[in-house]
Image (cartoon, grey):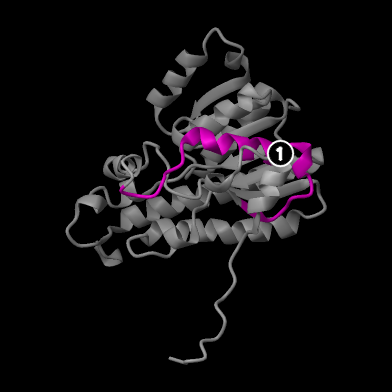
């Protein structure tokens, strides 16, 4: 790898932790940002005395706050001297919104949610990514090369009942990806989506859903480490011309050369409206 510098949000646990470690092990320098000090301390202990201690910096920050986003970018520049990759992975999931979702006899409705939950999910899943991207993009453009990678979700997760603010926040980030990719075209900076493509075995997944997936009662969930192969390809020179696409780790074929695996599953980011319904209303 190139020794580029990456910020990975949500990088202290789950998918983000696996991706931060994957980048660092491949030769990149990484600022892994999360919101729980215990997660940061655990990562420090695990990397202490290894080459990763110099390449991977855990940092606790609340990215909902603009000043904290400024602090994170400043920390990357102070520690590593530049910034080349922003991976917007931080997010709150169904476990935060509906802790008892898989134990309820009846599915909850959107009007049951408190204002604070809706605002916190939107601020974490979309506003934080937007704030980080607006701070990172000028630096990446100045470098003449860069990557912004966003983690959204499947369409049938965004728009299904009970998805509430989670689906809306991820849909906002999906469309933002399409817009940012167009506005950064020709600068050397690309914007793409990297998704699990299914549920994932992470702390943000309800324990009963994860157990049901492992037992075969639900479709297969993605292991965090499965995000790493498509990520490493997306930040490689092979992907320099790939802009405005989405890739799902669940569909990644590790038996193929990475570029071929990517072409096989690539889809344009964003949405298209349904065609008119010939049956009318």
Name the side, left or right, on which 105 lies relative to 255.
left
Task: From the viewer's side, name the closer residue of 261 and 99.
Answer: 261
Query: Compared with residue 70, is residue 244 higher up or lower down, i.e. above or below?
Result: below
Looking at the image, can residue 16 be seen?
no
Q: Quadrant of the C terminus?
A: bottom left
Residue at the image point whose x is 81% and y is 49% from the top: 187
Name the side, left or right, on which 94 lies relative to 32.
left
Secondary structure at badge 1 equals loop
Residue at the image point whose x is 47% and y is 33% from the top: 34
Residue at the outermost left position: 105
- Residues in magenta? 217-246
Give the percent coordinates (x, y) of residue 100: 22, 49
For label 1, count other residues whose C-alpha is less than 10 Å away and answer few (under 14), some (14-19) or many (20+).
Answer: few
Name the side, left or right, on which 162 lies relative to 31.
left
Residue at the image point whose x is 59% and y is 61% from the top: 175
Give the percent coordinates (x, y) of residue 213: 34, 44
Give the percent coordinates (x, y) of residue 132: 59, 44
Residue 64 in magenta?
no
Residue at the outermost front position: 255
Residue 233 in magenta?
yes
Query: Compared with residue 53, is residue 13 higher up or lower down, i.e. above or below?
Result: below
Residue at the image point whose x is 57% and y is 51% from the top: 130
């Amino acid at each position: 790898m190139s020794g580029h510098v990456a910020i990975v949000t949500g990088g202290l646990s789950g998918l983000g932790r696996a991706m931060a470690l994957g980048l660092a092990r491949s030769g990149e320098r990484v600022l892994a940002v999360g919101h729980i000090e215990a997660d940061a301390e655990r990562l420090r202990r695990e990397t202490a005395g290894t080459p990763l201690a110099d390449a991977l910096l855990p940092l606790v920050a609340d990215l909902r706050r603009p000043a904290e986003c400024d602090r994170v970018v400043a920390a990357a520049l102070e520690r590593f001297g530049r910034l080349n990759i922003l991976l917007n992975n931080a997010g709150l999931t169904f476990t935060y919104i509906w802790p008892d979702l898989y134990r309820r006899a009846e599915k909850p409705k959107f009007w049951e949610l408190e204002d604070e939950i809706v605002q916190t999910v939107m601020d974490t899943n979309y506003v934080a990514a937007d704030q980080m991207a607006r701070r990172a993009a000028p630096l990446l453009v100045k470098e003449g090369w860069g990557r912004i990678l966003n983690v959204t979700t499947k369409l049938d997760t965004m728009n299904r009942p009970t998805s509430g603010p989670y689906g809306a926040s991820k849909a906002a980030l999906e469309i933002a990806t399409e817009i940012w990719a167009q506005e950064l075209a020709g600068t050397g900076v690309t914007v793409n989506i990297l998704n699990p493509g299914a549920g994932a075995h992470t702390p943000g997944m309800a324990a009963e859903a994860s157990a049901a997936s492992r037992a075969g009662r639900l479709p297969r969930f993605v292991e965090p480490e499965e995000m790493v192969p498509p990520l490493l390809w997306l930040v490689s020179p092979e992907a320099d011309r790939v802009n405005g696409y989405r890739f799902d780790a669940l569909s990644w074929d590790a038996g193929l050369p990475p570029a071929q695996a990517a072409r096989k599953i690539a889809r344009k980011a964003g949405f298209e409206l349904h065609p008119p319904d010939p049956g009318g209303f």
